[in-house]
Amino acid sequence: MMLSRECDRRSGIVLRQGKAWFHISSAGHEALAAICEVLGPDDLVFPHYRDRALMLARGMGAEAQARDLMAKGLSHSAGRNMSSHFSHRAGNVFSLASPTGSQCLPAVGAAWASVLREENRVVVCSIGDASTRQGEFFEAVAFAVERSLPVVFLVSDNRYGISTPTDGLSPQRLGLLPPAITHEVDGSDPDRLHDVAARVLPRVRRGAGPAILWCSLDRLDSHTSSDDQRVYRDAAELAALRDPVESFGRRLTEEGLITADWTEATRVRLADEVEEVFDRVAEEPTGDPKAVLDHLFATDRTERVPGTDRDDSTGGTAGPTRPCGGTMVEAVNRALRTGLETHPELVLFGEDIEDPKGGVFGFTKGLGELAGPRMSNSPLAEATIVGAAVGLASVGMRPVVELQFVDFVGPAWNQLSAQLTTLRWRTASAWRCPAVIYAPWGGYLPGGGIWHSQSNESLFTHLPGLRVVVPSTPEDTEAVFLESFDCPDPTLILLPKHLMRRPNEPQSLPAPVHGARILRSGADVTVATWGNGTELATAAADVLATEGVGVDVLDLRWLTPLDRDAVAASLRRTGRLVVVQEDNRTSSFGASLLADLVAADDEFYELLAAPKLVSRADVHIPFHPDLESAVLPAADDVVAAIRSVLP
């Protein structure tokens, strides 16, 4: 506790010296470290930004905390994450992200992994009381109660959310938390916290379900270095704040366990040691700017899962072993069956995926007996689906989760953008998230309307660290699923609803798993497309072939990573380019592709005509089939665009 306080004091000095940019004080929260005395080394901690003392107790020493503060190259994030956003892989401390409460769902996902593996592991999810009003906190509690997960929610109730008093806002004071699992604790007294934790954690570990430790304490300093609490807290309130270091030290002195001289000597010693550490760290180099793009994706597909003896290439199942044909739905089902058979860590999770329903599209139908407890229905909560997948994947499981429609991804956006896609990069690959998400996508299926016809791929390709693929054949579908089960990075598979149930004859040879696929060959114009656009482009190419026009049709398949070389090479051969998409025009992936190619000299100077984008106007998909057809691109639109670039 004294070391934590000294690190906070020295951090303020370093900040004023201009050697750091931001600081969050843990003063007043130090007693929470006592919970570590009842945790084992294999237990996991999902931290809060005021958990400095708790981090010290888990092995993240003063040197690591100094590097964190000053964002040094040797810090846990290589200088990429904000200070006080703790992570310590060796101590099983998960990396903290800024969106408050976003650690809760990954925490219960990790706890679920412990149950699936029959491990004797507890997960501690630390969070501030203001953040417990986040919906993801309630989703996490509900999921933990539903499945009796071994997770402890450690709530720091300092009665403030920055400047807003939480006395009338917190779910505990509003009576919204289950009394049977909620334990109120004096969080400023390490002995009391230890006693409650020592009583509660063994029950959680034995499978009795989750617990909430609601810890009352005081925030002694301003919210952050960018705040001044004297603006909104009067002098009398500030004077009455409880200091756990002083009160605990005073009690130990009164009990004869320490002396005033020992306390003063220890304070001086720690001040000297911390000053030396912080001064030394201040001279260390920052991260290499040339390496800032590193760790977005894995460089080695067989990299080891930290803390385990497993690697990320357990089944060797990438790519179908034979041309498969049939429908894309059948291909998904085959791939999932193969994955369950070859990857013991694979877990299927999603709405209505259990038998006899097998998902609203039947992707998982008939897999229940093979999967057993590794396949289960999720609640109607997309954030829970993706957040639990983050936790499962981060501890070495292989979550493969289904979103019923990509249109409903909104509630999961926080987990996608804050956790799943940033985890590897913000921890320099110490933590990673090889989750697989698949979802029906796109229009051209009458009666879908606004919320069942979206082709919103540009939302996902905008997130660094996420692989995005849109297969359009059964062979490609099975191949990308099998490949994703072996991949160390998160993958989003978007399945065109219009094409999913269309029977296909087996291809003579399987196409390569990665890169673009050539659907038609021609020398006059290049057409690049994906998903439902492949049907429009090939139909247009067939019409123009009767007129002697040769069209090079490329199915991009992978949007991230993009096979740009294939498109550029075709454009340089033909000198003309048309991009076909069903998404609306503004800020779309197709518009981005055109901009990228036009901006490159090697391609720009080969152009014989201005490139064209065939796209939906900036309008939503209407419900009536006639109105849907009116706004979506058609094969005739592609023909017209191709003719417009011809001489």
Image (cartoon, grey):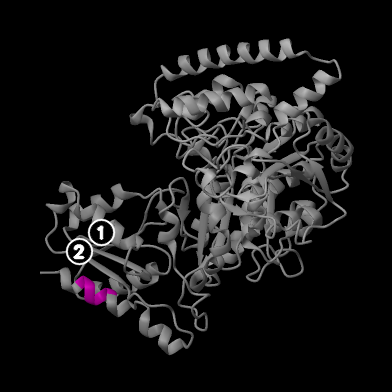
Q: Which residue is mark 1?
A: 594
Q: Residue at the spot x=44%, y=68% of the render?
A: 455
Image quadrant for the C terminus?
Answer: bottom left
Rendering quarter of residue 135: bottom right
Which secondary structure, mark 1?
A: helix
**Residue 528 drawn above or below residue 481:** below
**Residue 545 drawn above or below residue 629:** above
Checking the image for residue 611, the label placed there is 2
Name the one closer to the observer, 426 or 268.
268
Q: Residue at the spot x=71%, y=48% of the render?
A: 108
| Residue 227, image x, y percentages | 49, 43
Q: Is residue 54 left or right of residue 320?
A: right
Circles 1 and 2 in contact, beta carbons < 8 Å: yes
Q: Is residue 640 magenta?
A: yes
Badge 1 amino acid? Leu
Residue 110 shows in the view: yes
